[in-house]
């Protein structure tokens, strides 16, 4: 509803209409989530102790700034008001006062020391990543996140999490949903009241994993593992976004974290582990060509289309239609998709896609865009290639 | 302060309009534009012909030609007696702060060197600070010079992050080989050469101060020769690095810092030697400089000393330590 | 040669070949204004896209290019050259010098810029588009993942840096060497002082920027691995090198502004500047501190905690000398006899709004809290308060203040005041709400945003269109003044003005101080 009002005001562009629409929105916003939500203008207190401390610090430094402003601007406006020529003010000529100057050097200094103490304390706490109950490895990709639950027994569970908002909403062809741009296909699940350590890294460029309510923001630097931690003290869904410019879709790689009870968490993890076993079974299966092509089309449209185009016409990436590689030796083709091409935007997808998807996408590329090769790769082939056989 | 109020304040030579600047700016632009075209062409369209090289050469010709004219103009103005002591001091200041800016340029690269040696390298190998980087670079050990890159340690195919280049360390490095082999070690000879050239340029300076032109010419000539032999030895060293040691720009951070530092230094030596050569020609062919006025020479010698000091830093931090 | 007796040459070659500090100053000022319009149009595209949620005008790639080019053009094309223009015009006149110390090089410094920015702007039309990695161009987004135009960007930065270095060497030489007899360092006007210190900052950090882009060039095209962990380098190394340049750079953008305001406030308060000496020392302390705080832009990259603490303490410290300046300005006005001509209005707004920006800077300096602020619109709000209400407002003030001296004509005060009030309100309308969306969690550099940020963004966009259009008034006022403003001849222009520049004729003759004045 209020989106329509916005479009109207966009058309007219008049400030008057803007205000009307603002007021009207305020009054009729029954279905708009809530006033408070729409006009949020402060940091969230969040769901962690550290977050609450940060919030406290934020309010402290904020009120100090307000205090300084009141004094400084008060003095300034009084001066501007009182000593105007039009009121007959005559300029005095003093231009020095050592006492005054010492005073206003020392007072701010003392205030700053007052700020530095609590800040140091909180900072040390943020940096204390020891004795976590759970380790989650977070890897930023252009433009999605990979989460990997590190399992002491080696049964790591991992999956990718990417934007779920459809293009039609982004391009204003459909009404935008409640969580527009803040929704993902697979959220991260965390147990409540557990200290979780995040191992944050990047795969390609620098990203930054940020969930305000968990009070974590850590840059994901390719080749380096950063540490951070959180301990949510209440359950709920917490949303965040990538906070470091990472290329085209930087604005479109949100983060959703479901903090749930331990039981729910265990159930979810169990499900994930079962899925992984299922995938293993798939890996041993012989797929038919149409099966692979169909699956591969999906993979292609999710992962490759951005660079290689809908019809394999290329873009950032080389054209695949009739390309020497897509119509040449299938091993080379698999190889370039698995290992990428050094020094170009073509990444190594071997770590991002599972064997089934890799086999499927390569098969798809060889049988689409007029390539009609008619051959296919099976998951085992990929597996062998990855293992260097 | 005190000096300046007495020194020819009545006449500060402000040149007439001059075409020099606009030509220099244009030449500079053409050079970098051409260079960018050449580089991009080699990277993205290496298989097609390109005329960018011509732009680069034309740009350099305009730029260098203009600089030549520029220096000739200033030299002639000075010799025509148009420069007050105060104006000469402006040139002195200009040169000094130019050298300072060069120092800062080198500092960026030295900073990079210290950063990777002291901080980033050990972090990558999870040394000391218990970092978790071994999750990515399992098996990587840090040592300096870096003979095996993190990528090599884990293997290209098993590399965790997106691949943006292949970096393989050298087979051998150019560090201090120990006292027994010291005399087969080029950097030592280079150090000796460069240090003595600083000394010889000083002798040349004393020569002109004492109005002994013979001394000036001789030692200046020797300095230029030393500079050129340094360049030659450096060339030999690079040749050896590329052909025998496997040390190239692709050899990871050791190769990167090594070639950038020594390369920029070498470039400055070539520049410095050229400038000194010009001063040599001025002294011998044109008979410039006197015991009272030899700023062109002096500026060149400061530059040379600066290049020398940078080398001492290089010798210590790139080769020895 | 009779070089003191000629007036300006005629025609285009006057500008191409000039060695006159006033001509070169004029060139710089017009150039920077053109860049302000260019950078401003990019900002208008940004704000139009952000007017409401969803993508309506531009694609994300192009949006990133706009953000990048906006930042680059504004910082390197608008503000820095504008201050160099002022320096060219004013420093020789303020210290009683015949011209800049190295006049031909002065012309070279200028003429590099149009070429550099033409090259930078041309990247918009290249295959793959213009630089799209933010004005801070973090590797590896700006190396491995950059569009081909990055090579042109790198070389543009190189020659632009060369121009800045030459420009600042010139200023250093002028100030050290060309002061009139009796003009001791501690008698120099503050504008000269602040520029003198800025020039040192420039000579120290521009070469470091050159180093940073050189490393990029090598990584992209020649196989080095400065910023690649696979070869033993570190992407964060780039950030260290960049911010070692970048933080002093933000003071480069503001210190001359401090100088301008320190000239204007005494004039219209009709009272000498309070605490001259402490102003000088404060400026020097800010410059010194600026070298040891760079990592406050990198709190979230995973620095060791000791480093984090060091940079937090050092950053907080900067509030002290800056506070000294603010207090000095206010005390200068205290017990003055104030009038509020346009330059004074902009100066008072400067003190007010810059302090707001400075205070949000102190909030950002608190490392633990910066974890929540970093890379949000809160930061965007902070730096527009310091750079638009700081640098741009002081430049505007300076233009109104010295325009009568430059042209011998008076601008329209009514139009000037209108321009001020429009700018003041529109500026706040644009950037104040950005604090709120930032705190509420809106990241910067995004072309599209979640619904809860919609209303404030719309307000901000409206403000931005207003702010942008009110600058037309400024442009118009300046052109009108030059062509048909009321002629004035009083050397002093402003009743309370002090200093050598007000002793020469109005309009300032083509050559001033062919023999140095005696300063007592
Ligand atoms: C003109 C430019 C300018 C200026 C002057 C400043 C001034 C300051 N800046 Fe700002 N800053 C920028 C331009 C500027 N900044 C830009 C462009 C960025 C973003 C770059 C990017 O990422 O793109 C940035 C980002 C930035 C960050 C990083 C934020 C982030 O990315 O997470 C930080 C963090 O510490 C910071 C701090 C400060 C501080 C402490 C000051 C101080 O100098 C302010 C000092 C002034 C005052 C404090 C007010 C007056 C003082 C008093 C009245 C005394 C009493 C006060 C107290 C006791 C509190 N700035
Ligand atoms: C120093 C300089 C400076 C100045 C003056 C400005 C001025 C403005 N900036 Fe800015 N801005 C930056 C420096 C500056 N900015 C930087 C460094 C960044 C970070 C970039 C990055 O993230 O990498 C940034 C980022 C930035 C963003 C965030 C973008 C993002 O994160 O995606 C936004 C968004 O609102 C914005 C808006 C504006 C607006 C509305 C103005 C307005 O004040 C502009 C108003 C001016 C004009 C509109 C031009 C003048 C108009 C006329 C004279 C009218 C006549 C016109 C014609 C005849 C055509 N800027
Ligand atoms: Cu990922 Cu921004
Ligand atoms: Cu800073």
Image (cartoon, rainbow, N blue to C red):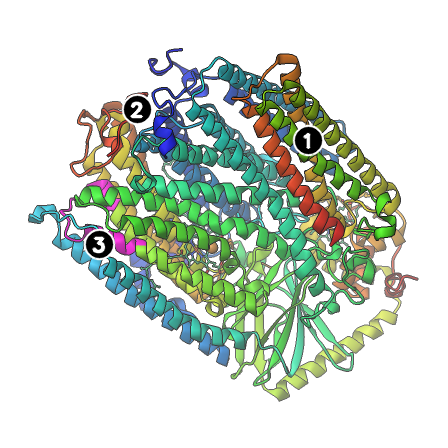
Please tell me whether residue A245 is drawn above or below residue B314 in the rendered image: below
Name the side, left or right, on which A295 lies relative to A12.
right
- Residue, far right: A389
Mark 2–mark 3 distance (CA, rounded to whole Å): 33 Å
Number of labels in the image equals 3
Q: Which residues are magenta?
A: C325-346
- Residue, far bottom: A263
Where the C terminus of chain C falls, by quadrant?
top left
- Residue, far left: A88
- State the mark number for residue C513: 2
Chain letter belonging to callout 3? C
- State the mark number for residue C331: 3
Visible in this render: residue B107? yes
Residue at which label 1 appears:
B200
Tell me if the residue at label 1 has its CB under 8 Å from ligand 4.
no
How crowded is the residue under tag 2: few (<14 C-alpha within 10 Å), some, or many (20+)?
Answer: some
The image quadrant in which ligand 1 is located: bottom left
Residues at marks 3 and 1 touching, judged by CB atoms closer than 8 Å: no
Task: Choose top left, top right, bottom left or bottom right for residue C188.
Answer: top left
């Amino acid at each position: 509803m209020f989106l329509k009002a916005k479009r109207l005001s966009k058309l007219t562009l008049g400030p008057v209409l803007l205000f009307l629409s603002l007021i009207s929105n305020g009054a009729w916003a029954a279905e708009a989530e809530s006033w408070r939500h729409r006009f949020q203008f402060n940091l969230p207190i969040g769901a962690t102790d550290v977050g609450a401390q940060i919030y406290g610090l934020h309010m402290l430094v904020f009120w100090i700034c307000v205090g300084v402003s009141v004094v400084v601007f008060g003095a300034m406006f009084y001066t501007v008001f009182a000593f105007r020529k039009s009121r007959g003010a005559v300029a005095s000529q003093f231009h020095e006062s050592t006492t005054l100057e010492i005073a206003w050097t020392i007072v701010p200094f003392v205030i700053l020391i007052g700020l530095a103490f609590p800040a140091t304390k909180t900072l040390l706490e943020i940096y204390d990543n020891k004795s976590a109950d759970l380790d989650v490895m977070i890897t930023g990709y252009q433009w999605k996140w990979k989460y990997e639950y590190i399992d002491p027994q080696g049964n790591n569970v991992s999956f990718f999490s990417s934007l779920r908002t459809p293009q039609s909403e982004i391009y204003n062809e459909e009404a935008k949903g409640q969580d527009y741009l803040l929704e993902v296909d697979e959220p991260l699940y965390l147990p409540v009241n557990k200290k979780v350590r995040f191992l944050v890294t990047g795969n390609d460029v620098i990203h930054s994993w940020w969930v305000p309510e968990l009070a974590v923001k850590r840059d994901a630097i390719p080749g380096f593992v950063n540490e951070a931690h959180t301990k949510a003290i209440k359950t709920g869904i917490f949303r965040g976004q990538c906070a470091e410019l990472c290329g085209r879709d930087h604005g479109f790689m949100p983060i959703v974290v479901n903090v749930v009870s331990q039981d729910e968490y265990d159930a979810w993890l169990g499900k994930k582990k079962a899925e992984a076993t299922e995938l293993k079974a798939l890996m041993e299966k012989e797929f038919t060509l149409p099966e692979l092509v169909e699956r591969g089309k999906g993979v292609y449209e999710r992962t490759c289309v951005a660079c290689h185009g809908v019809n394999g016409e290329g873009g950032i990436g080389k054209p695949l239609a009739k390309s020497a590689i897509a119509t040449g030796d299938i091993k080379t083709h698999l190889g370039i998709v698995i290992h990428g091409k050094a020094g170009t935007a073509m990444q190594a997808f071997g770590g991002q896609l599972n064997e089934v998807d890799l086999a499927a996408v390569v098969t798809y590329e060889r049988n689409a865009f007029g390539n009609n090769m008619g051959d296919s790769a099976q998951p085992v082939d990929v597996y062998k290639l990855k293992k260097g056989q | 302060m005190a000096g300046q109020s007495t020194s020819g304040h009545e006449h500060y030579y402000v040149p007439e309009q001059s075409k020099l600047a606009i030509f220099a700016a244009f030449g500079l632009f053409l050079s970098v534009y051409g260079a960018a075209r050449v580089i991009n062409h080699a990277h993205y369209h290496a298989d097609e012909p390109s005329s960018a090289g011509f732009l680069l050469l034309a740009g350099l010709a305009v730029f260098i030609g203009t600089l030549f004219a520029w220096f000739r103009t200033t030299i002639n103005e000075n010799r025509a007696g148009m420069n007050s002591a105060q104006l000469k001091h402006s040139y002195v200041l200009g040169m000094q702060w130019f050298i300072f800016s060069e120092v800062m340029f080198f500092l960026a690269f030295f900073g990079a060197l210290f950063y990777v040696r002291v901080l980033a390298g050990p972090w990558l190998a999870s040394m000391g600070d218990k970092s978790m980087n071994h999750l990515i670079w399992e098996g990587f050990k840090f040592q300096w010079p870096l003979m095996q890159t993190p990528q090599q340690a884990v293997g290209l195919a098993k590399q965790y992050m997106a691949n943006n280049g292949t970096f393989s360390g050298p087979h051998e490095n150019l560090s201090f080989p120990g006292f027994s082999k010291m005399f087969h070690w080029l950097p030592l000879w280079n150090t000796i050469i460069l240090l003595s050239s600083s000394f010889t340029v000083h002798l040349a300076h004393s020569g002109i101060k004492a109005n002994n032109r013979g001394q000036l010419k001789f030692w200046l000539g020797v300095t230029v020769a030393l500079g050129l032999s340094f360049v030659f030895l450096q060339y030999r060293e690079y040749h050896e690095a590329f052909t025998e040691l496997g040390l190239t720009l692709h050899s990871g951070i050791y190769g990167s810092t090594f070639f950038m530092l020594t390369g920029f230094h070498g470039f400055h030596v070539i520049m410095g030697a050229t400038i000194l050569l010009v001063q040599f020609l001025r002294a011998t062919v044109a008979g410039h400089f006197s015991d009272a006025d030899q700023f062109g020479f002096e500026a060149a010698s400061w530059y040379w000393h600066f290049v020398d000091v940078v080398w001492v830093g290089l010798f210590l931090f790139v080769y020895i330590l | 040669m009779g070089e003191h007796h000629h007036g300006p040459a005629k025609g285009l070659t006057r500008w191409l070949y000039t060695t006159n500090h006033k001509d070169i100053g004029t060139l710089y000022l017009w150039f920077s204004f053109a860049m302000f319009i260019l950078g401003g149009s990019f900002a208008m595209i940004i704000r139009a896209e952000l007017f409401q949620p969803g993508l309506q005008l531009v694609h994300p790639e192009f949006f990133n290019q706009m953000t990048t080019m906006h930042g680059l053009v504004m910082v390197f094309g608008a503000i820095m050259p504008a201050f160099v223009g002022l320096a060219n015009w004013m420093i020789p006149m303020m210290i009683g010098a015949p011209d800049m110390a190295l006049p031909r090089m002065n012309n070279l410094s200028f003429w590099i810029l149009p070429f550099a920015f033409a090259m930078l702007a041309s990247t918009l039309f290249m295959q793959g588009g213009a630089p799209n990695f933010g004005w801070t161009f973090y590797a590896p987004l700006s190396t491995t993942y950059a569009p081909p135009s990055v090579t042109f960007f790198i070389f543009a930065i190189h020659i632009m840096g060369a121009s800045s270095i030459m420009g600042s060497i010139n200023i250093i030489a002028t100030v050290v060497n060309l002061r009139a007899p009796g003009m001791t360092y501690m008698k120099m006007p503050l504008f000269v002082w602040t520029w003198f210190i800025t020039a040192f900052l420039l000579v120290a950090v521009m070469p470091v920027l050159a180093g940073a882009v050189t490393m990029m060039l090598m990584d992209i095209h020649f196989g080095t691995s400065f910023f690649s962990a696979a070869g033993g380098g570190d992407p964060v190394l780039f950030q260290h090198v960049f911010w070692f340049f970048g933080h002093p750079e933000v003071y480069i953008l503001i210190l001359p502004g401090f100088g301008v305001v320190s000239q204007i406030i005494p004039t219209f308060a009709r009272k000498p500047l309070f605490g001259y000496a402490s102003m000088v020392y404060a400026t020097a302390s800010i410059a010194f501190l600026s070298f040891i705080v760079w990592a406050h832009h990198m709190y979230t990259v995973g620095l060791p905690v000791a480093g984090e603490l060091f940079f937090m303490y050092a950053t907080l410290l900067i509030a002290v000398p800056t506070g000294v300046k603010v207090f000095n300005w206010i005390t200068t006005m205290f017990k003055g006899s104030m009038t509020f001509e346009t330059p004074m209005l902009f100066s008072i707004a400067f003190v007010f709004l810059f302090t707001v920006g400075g205070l949000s800077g102190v909030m950002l300096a608190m490392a633990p809290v910066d974890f929540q602020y970093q890379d949000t619109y809160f930061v965007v709000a902070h730096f527009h308060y310091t750079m638009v209400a700081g640098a741009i407002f002081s430049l505007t003030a300076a233009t109104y203040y010295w325009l009568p001296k430059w042209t011998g004509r008076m601008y329209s005060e009514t139009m000037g005041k209108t321009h001020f009030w429009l700018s003041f309100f529109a500026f706040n309308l644009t950037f104040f709400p950005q604090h709120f969306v930032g705190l509420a969690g809106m990241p910067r550099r995004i072309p599209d945003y979640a619904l809860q940020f919609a209303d404030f963004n719309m307000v901000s966009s409206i403000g931005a269109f207003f702010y942008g259009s009110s600058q037309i008034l400024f442009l118009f006022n300046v052109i009108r003044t030059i062509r048909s403003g009321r002629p004035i001849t009083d050397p002093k222009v402003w009743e309370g003005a002090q200093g050598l520049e007000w002793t020469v004729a109005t309009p300032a003759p083509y050559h001033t101080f062919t023999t140095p004045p005696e300063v007592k």
